[in-house]
Image: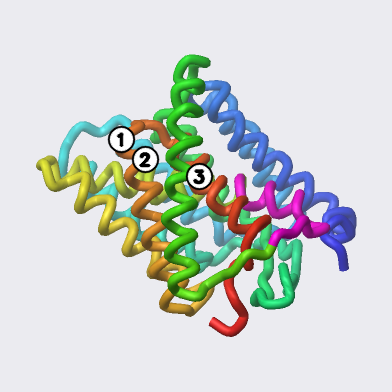
Amino acid sequence: MSALSILIQNPVASLAFLCLLASLISCWFCEGYYLFAPIYVIAYVLAFAGGIVTYGSLLPLSIILICLLVLKFHPKRFVHLFASMILAILGVFIMSHMVKGFHNLLLIDGVQYGTSSIPMNMYLNFDKVSLATFLLGLYVPLINNKDKWKQTFLIVIPYAAFAIIILLFYGRAAHLFALDIKIPSTSLYFLIINLFFISIPEEAFFRGFLQQEIIKGLSNKAGPFLAILSVSILFGIMHFFFIPNFYFVLGATIASLLYGTIYYFSGTIESAIATHFLVNVVHFFFFTYPFFQSS
C-alpha cells in the first residue's frame, strides 16, 4: 500500500499529524504557549479519535509539562536537577518509542532505497514530535529575527559541508555505504519525515535540552566537552536499538559530536537541526541509505 493510500484511509489520524506539525512549527512564530498549546490540544484530540494515542499517553505528557514548568520557573538548584533527571530519563524512553500510550503510524513499510541497501520503515511519530513541541515551546530558545537567520545560514552551509565530508570518509572507511545517486518515488515523504519527525525532535532533545542541562549542571571549563561527548555516546547507543550495527552506531556517535559542536558554538538549535537534516539528505540522495545490506 502506498504512503498516500495510508494517509487517505486514515483521515482523522492524518489530520492529527498535520495539526501536530502546525503546533511544532508555530513555536517559531509565537514565544510561549499561546499558539502552540491550543493547536497541540486539537492535534491530541484528533490523535485520540484516530487511535494514535490512548489514555496511557496522558501521564508521560503531563510529567513532561510539569518538569518543563519547573525548569522554567523554579529557581532552587535541587528541584531543577531533579526535574532535569526525570525529563532526561523519560525523554530517552520516548525517543526509543518505549513509552506506552502511543501508536505511531507506519507510513512506509520495508522500502529498499537501492539494490544494496537494507530495507527500512518510516513512521509518523506522535511521541517524539510531542516532546519536541513542548521543549521548543517552553524551554529551548529559538531564532526570532531575520539577521539571526541569515547568520545561522552562513554558518550552517560550510559547517554542514564539513560534517558531510567527515562522515563520508568515515562511511567509506567503515564500508557502510557507497555512491548511489537516486531520486526515489517516496523522496517527498522522506524529506518531511526526516525534518519534522527525526531531525527537529532529536536535536531539540539531545542538544537543546540534554546537552544544555549537562553543561549547566557541570559549570566548569570541561562541561561543554563532557556534555557533547556524553550526549553523543548516548545518541549512538540509542541508534543500536534501531539498526544493530557497530559501525553504524559509531557513525551516529561521530555525527552527534558534529551536531553538538555546532550547537554549542553557534548558540542556536536551528544550526544543529539544519546540519542534521542536510547530512541526512545528502546521504539519502547520493549514497547507500541507510547502509550496505552486507554490513
Name the amino acid, label 3: Ala
Left or right of residue 91, residue 264 in this image? left
- Judge depth for marks 2 and 3 and give the one in front: 2
Dot label at residue 262: 2
Which color scheme is applied? rainbow
Q: Are marks 1 and 2 in contact (CB under 8 Å)?
A: yes
Left or right of residue 13, residue 61 in this image? left
Q: At which x and y percent is residue 208?
A: 38, 41
- Residue for point 35% across, 60% down: 89
- Label 2: which secondary element: helix
For disc 1, the marked residue is: 265
Residue 207 visible within the image? yes
Dot label at residue 132: 3
Left or right of residue 117, residue 273 in this image? left
Which residue is at the front of the view, 182 or 67? 182
- Name the outermost residue toward the left: 220
| Residues shaded magenta | 181-195
Left or right of residue 125, residue 201 in this image? left
